[in-house]
Amino acid sequence: MLAWIPRGLRQGVVTTAYPRRREVPPDGFHGPVAVLDGIGADRELEWCCPAGAIAVGDDGRLTLDRGRCIQCGECVRVAPHRFAYEHRFETAARRRGALIVGGDGDDGDPEPTRATLAAQARALGRSIHVRHIDTGSDGAEEWEIQALWNPYYDIQRLGFFLTAAPRHADILLATGVVTAAMREPLARTWAVMPEPKALIAVGTDACSGGLSAPDGDGEGAGGIDSVLGVDVYVPGSPPPPIAILDALLLAVGILGREGSR
């Protein structure tokens, strides 16, 4: 046990300095997919995406819905001149439309809920309690959320604490597609949370339903916003811990969309 003391002194502080300093992804990291060239695209490109995230209009305008993208990389492989991975962690957006790139997506302005949450966080010494609910996840997002409370991310240093009681929660982290069995528990959990509160959809499944998203006939499981209004969307399959942390800071107004404190 005593051997850990000199080892800790040699290593120094290993906790990330984010958001005070930007977290740089490692080499080879596959961040959100970007549209490099969205003009004059062929409709055949739509077929390379198993999640239906790619759309080509009649005018050849190409758009990519990050809210449906599972980051399989097929589009990057098939059309590297049109698609590429971005080298960054932050993907959260306040509006569902802001996840559609190549179009006219817009984050919009912060809503009163976030402004109120920010004021509450300051009044309580940045004490924000987070409740997590799995509405039909494959388990990938849960690993990333759990990592936020390890020594490297140490999210408690920023005033975020995990709670099992919805009545004590300020933020609800929802993961997975909304299965029929979880629609009522999700709505009930949200209903008992006190105001002010915010709902964050974590992962592609939660943002849109992912591979289970409703098709043209309305079949399939939808995302969280098929049941409740979402305050912040975090796409990714799964999103890394920094992306989820970015969403939490965005939800309480500590970060602006440009990353300013």
Image (tube, grey):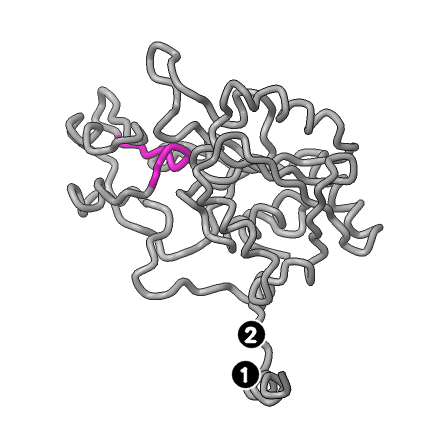
Relative to 245, residue 98 above or below: above
Residue positioned 22% across, 23% down in the render: 59
The single residue placed furthest to the front in the displayed view is: 1
Few, some or many residues within 10 Å of mark 1 (<14, 14–19, 20+) = few
Residues drawn in magenta: 62-70
Mark sitting on residue 14: 2
- In terms of secondary structure, where does tag 1 sit? helix
Q: Residue 57 location in percent, x, y?
A: 26, 23
Report helix, strand or loop for mark 2.
Answer: loop
Q: Are marks 2 and 1 in contact (CB under 8 Å)?
A: yes
Q: Distance between the Cα atoms at labels 2 and 1? A: 7 Å
Q: Residue furthest right?
A: 123
Q: Amino acid at mark 1?
A: Gln
Q: Is residue 66 magenta?
A: yes
Query: Position of 119 compared to 62: left or right?
Result: right
Relative to residue 77, is residue 221 depicted above or below? Answer: above
* Amino acid at pointer 2: Val
Q: Which residue is mark 1?
A: 11
Q: Position of residue 242 (x, y in %)?
A: 51, 55
Compare residues 239 and 65 and report the one nearer the observer. 239
Q: Nearer the viewer, residue 260 or 135?
A: 135
Left or right of 57, for residue 197:
right
Indicate the quadrant where residue 116 lies. top right
Magenta highlight on residue 194:
no
Residue at the image position 71 percent from the left and 52 percent from the top: 161
Q: For mark 2, does the 10 Å Cα neighbourhood hold few (<14), some (14 to 19), or many (20 or more) residues? A: few
The location of residue 47, given as percent across then percent down, is: 19, 28
